[in-house]
Image: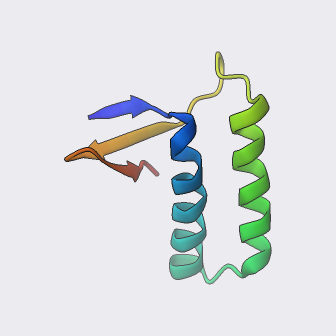
Amino acid sequence: MIRTFLQKDLQYVIEAHIRIYRDEYNYDDSFAEFITHAVNSFGCSGNHATEMLWVMELDQTASLLR
């Protein structure tokens, strides 16, 4: 099932981005700081009428669509 994000998904999104970009592109810890700030900003003050994050659930387990 593909659904819009829930606030509880934000930490998963952060962790998934850090893991994917570290493993696939060799990004360092400075990216972790950047993505943590960006995702938290989106969660707190993003314009959710025009910006959206989609999450795919398999067996009720979230998976980031990229």
10 left or right of 41 in image: left
Q: As drawn, which residue projects farthest toward the top? A: 49
x%, y% of residue 54? 46, 36
Q: As drawn, which residue projects farthest toward the front? A: 8
Camera-side residue of 10 and 17 = 10
Q: Residue at image x 52%, y 81%?
A: 23
Q: Residue at image x 51%, y 63%?
A: 16
Q: Quadrant of the N terminus?
A: top left
34 left or right of 21 in image: right
54 left or right of 28 in image: left
Q: Is residue 21 above or below residue 6?
A: below
**Scheme by which the image is coloured:** rainbow
The part of the image, by quadrant, that contains residue 3 is top left
Q: Is residue 12 above or below residue 57?
A: below
Q: Is residue 9 above or below residue 3?
A: below
Camera-side residue of 22 and 42 = 42
x%, y% of residue 56? 34, 42
Camera-side residue of 66 and 41 = 41
x%, y% of residue 5? 50, 34
x%, y% of residue 17? 57, 62
Q: Residue at image x 75%, y 34%?
A: 44
